[in-house]
């Protein structure tokens, strides 16, 4: 996990950042990092931030993939 974000309203985000998740091995590694950290912060939202979201990608339950621009503007959907 790259960082933990604690918001003023009490929300907590676990954030993993990767420029490109087109390769299945890369995606698996990044998701594994979030899963490992999630055990310590079970109420946190798990977010994988990338420069460009691939058009057809399935994500495990509880993981949100967001493009960096959307995350910076806080326009992400769970």
Image (spheres, rainbow, N blue to C red):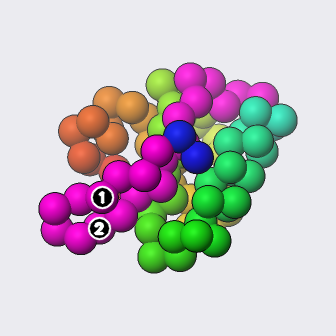
Is 53 on the left-hand or right-hand side of 34?
left
Residue shown at the point (26%, 47%) measured from the top left:
75
**Mark number, residue 6:** 1
- Viewer can see residue 58: no
Within the image, what quadrant is residue 8 found in?
bottom left
Q: Is residue 42 left or right of residue 58?
A: left
Q: Residue furthest front?
A: 40
On screen, residue 2 above or below 34? above
- Does residue 60 appear in the picture of this structure? yes
Residues packed near mark 2 inside 10 Å, few (<14), some (14 to 19) or many (20 plus): few
Q: Name the residue nearer the viewer: 8 or 55.
A: 8
Q: Secondary structure at mark 2?
A: loop
Label annotation for residue 52: none
Residue segment shown in magenta? 3-23
> What residue is disc 2 on?
11
Residue 24 lies, with reference to residue 42, above or below; the image says above
Q: Would residue 45 be found to the left or right of residue 61 on screen?
A: left
Total number of numbered labels?
Answer: 2
Residue 53: image location, x then y, percent: 53, 34
Reply yes or no: does residue 8 show up in magenta.
Answer: yes
Q: Which of the two discs, 1 and 2, sits closer to the camera?
A: 1
| Residue at disc 1, secondary structure | strand
- Name the residue furthest left: 8
The spot of residue 34 in percent (x, y) is 62, 54
Q: Residue at x 53, y 75 (%)?
A: 42
> Which picture quadrant has residue 60?
bottom right
- Determine which quarter of the picture holds residue 35: bottom right
- Residue 52, given in percent of the width and then of the height, sits at 50, 27
Quick one: 37 or 21, which is closer to the camera?
37
Q: Are marks 1 and 2 in contact (CB under 8 Å)?
A: yes
Disc 1 versus disc 2: distance between alpha carbons?
6 Å
């Amino acid at each position: 996990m790259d960082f933990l974000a604690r918001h003023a309203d009490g929300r907590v985000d676990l954030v993993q950042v990767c420029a490109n998740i087109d390769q299945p091995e890369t995606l698996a590694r990044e998701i594994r990092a979030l899963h490992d950290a999630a055990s310590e912060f079970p109420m946190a939202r798990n977010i994988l931030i990338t420069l460009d979201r691939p058009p057809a990608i399935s994500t495990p339950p509880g993981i949100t993939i967001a493009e960096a621009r959307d995350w910076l503007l806080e326009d992400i959907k769970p």
